[in-house]
Amino acid sequence: MEKTKIPHGDEVVTVELTVKELIALTGVRLYDNNSSKISAYKKLNHTLEKAWSNDEKDSALA
C-alpha cells in the first residue's frame, strides 16, 4: 500500500487558539457558542494554506 507523501510534512507550525476554540475542536459541544469551532477551523485552514504557499514558493526556487 502506497502512503501519501506530504512535502515538509514533519515541519512544525504554530496556531494560536483560544481555550474555547481548543475545547470545541476536541468534540465537546459548546451550546452557547458554535462560532468557536468555526473560528478554530478557519485559523487551522489559514495556517495550512500559508504553509503550503510557502512550500510552493520554495519549490519554484529549486
Image (tube, grey):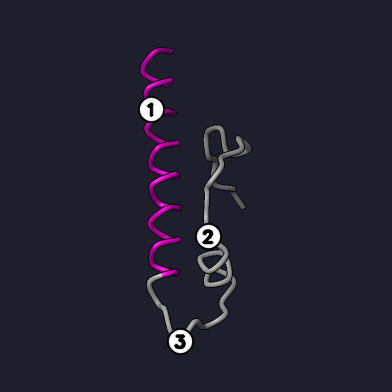
Q: Quadrant of residue 51?
A: top left
Q: Is residue 28 above or below residue 54?
A: below
Residue 48 placement, left or right of 6: left
Q: Quadrant of residue 27?
A: bottom right
Residue topped by disc 1: 56
Work out which residue is located at the far top of the displayed protein and give it: 62
Between the residue at mark 3 and the residue at mark 2, the CA separation in whole angstroms equals 17 Å
Q: Which badge, 2 or 1, comes first in the chain's sequence?
A: 2
Q: Where residue 54 sits: x, y (%)?
A: 41, 28
Does the CB distance between marks 3 and 2 fall below 8 Å?
no
Quadrant where the C terminus lies?
top left
- Please tell me whether mark 3 sits on a helix, a strand or a loop: loop
Q: Which badge, 3 or 1, comes first in the chain's sequence?
A: 3
Between the residue at mark 2 and the residue at mark 1, the CA separation in whole angstroms equals 30 Å
Instruction: Depth check: give the residue in front, 61 or 50.
Output: 50
Q: Is residue 50 above or below residue 38?
A: above
Q: Identify which residue is drawn at 59% across, 71% down.
A: 26
Does the CB distance between marks 2 and 1 fall below 8 Å?
no
Q: Identify which residue is drawn at 54% across, 40% down.
A: 5
Question: Which disc is residue 18 wearing?
Answer: 2
Crowding around mark 2 (Cα neighbors within 10 Å: few <14, some 14 to 19, many 20+) is few
- Please tell me whether mark 2 sits on a helix, a strand or a loop: loop
Does 50 lie within the magenta span?
Answer: yes
Front disc: 2 or 1:
2
Magenta segment range?
36-62
Q: Where residue 13 sits: x, y (%)?
A: 56, 40
Residue topped by disc 3: 31
* Circle 3: residue type: Tyr
Crowding around mark 3 (Cα neighbors within 10 Å: few <14, some 14 to 19, many 20+) is few
Q: Is residue 34 above or below residue 9?
A: below
Between the residue at mark 3 and the residue at mark 1, the CA separation in whole angstroms equals 40 Å
Instruction: Depth check: give the residue in front, 30 or 47.
Output: 30
